[in-house]
Amino acid sequence: MNALLGLFGNNILPIFLAAGSGYAAAKYLEVTPRPISQVAFYIFSPCLIFSLLTSNQLKGSEIARMAGFTVVSIAILGLVTYVIGRLLQFDRRLLVAVLLTTMFSNAGNYGLSLNLFAFGEKALAHASVYFVTMAILIYTLGVVIASLGSSSLSEAFVSLLKAPVVYAVVLALLFTEFGLRLPLPLDRTVNLLGDAAIPVLMVLMGVQLGRAKWDGQISALTVTNFMRLVIGPALALGLSLLFGLQGAARQAGISESAMPTAVINTVLATEFNVEPSFVSTVVFVSTLLSPITVTPLLAYLGA
């Protein structure tokens, strides 16, 4: 028990304390999430993605393996969740919200920090690939899914073209492929803004949690949290064998798959008006429940 408490205190509690500042700001300073989410969506996140993609030192085979693991695990989890949602007859908007909150984990502001604290720099490098891959999916597939809550498929793809991270990914891939570098002043600016993304998202998580409202959708909430916190890491354990993940890569892949619902889902839900109250509730509940599942998982993975 003392070992588990130590794992929680050293690796998870700092994340909760940082988010707590955002929670307090929402409660006592009446800070609202929309302006923060817009800054994160349009400025900080694209810079972070560009920086991570252009500075990662992993081998191409390691990056491809982790990226493939991420895509397959998210796709299978989404497919299973979709089937369950249809069986439970969730309406269109609620089903979209459940898909978003189940498929996309808090691999950035929670997962990257956790991997650094628990497993070190090597695991952080692999976790960064997971995060970047998932971020690409969020800002492509996630935008399309969110748009489908109230739009047609063609309108959803138009919304995709408005997501700045898409262009950050394209630019980063071009820079990497041709060995290009930004001018030093611009490079430092991008790095500064990218470095700000994780703490801003941690504060945003707290602000969103402070404004979460219970809406009584107990069945959808139960499905989402069970799929996100239990089935997600269980699926990752099996897929880590299929993809041959070992050592730091295995630690990063499985732990990232065990993270609670991503805060960025609240940004998408707000931007596309897809059950934002429910999504905020899922983020709140899954984050509070996550130490129960993540702490023993860290012990199993050898933190």
Image (cartoon, rainbow, N blue to C red):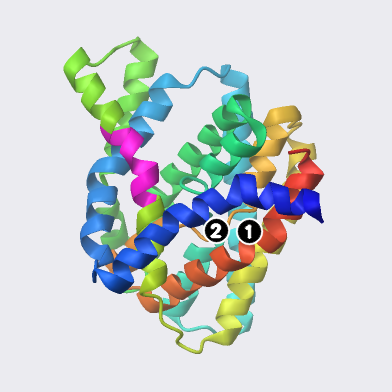
Magenta span dominant secondary structure: helix
Classed neighbour count for the residue bearing mark 2: other residues with Cα under 10 Å, few (<14), some (14–19), many (≥20) = many
Q: Earlier in the sequence, mark 2 or mark 1?
A: 1
Disc 1 designates what residue? 77
Question: Which quadrant holds residue 66?
Answer: top right
Report if residue 152 is visible in the image: no
- How far across and how far down the image is residue 37, in percent? 28, 57
- How far across and how far down the image is residue 163, in percent? 27, 48
The question of residue 161 being in magenta is answered with no
Q: Amino acid at mark 2?
A: Met
Position of 297 with respect to 143 (left or right) is right
Name the residue rendered at 47%, 75% in the picture.
281
Segment colored magenta? 193-201
Position of 210 with respect to 8 (left or right) is left
Name the residue rendered at 25%, 56% in the picture.
36
Q: In terms of secondary structure, where does tag 2 sit?
A: helix
Report if residue 213 is visible in the image: yes
Disc 2 designates what residue? 103
Q: Amino acid at mark 1?
A: Leu
The question of residue 199 being in magenta is answered with yes
* Image quarter (top left, top right, bottom left or bottom right) of the N terminus: bottom right
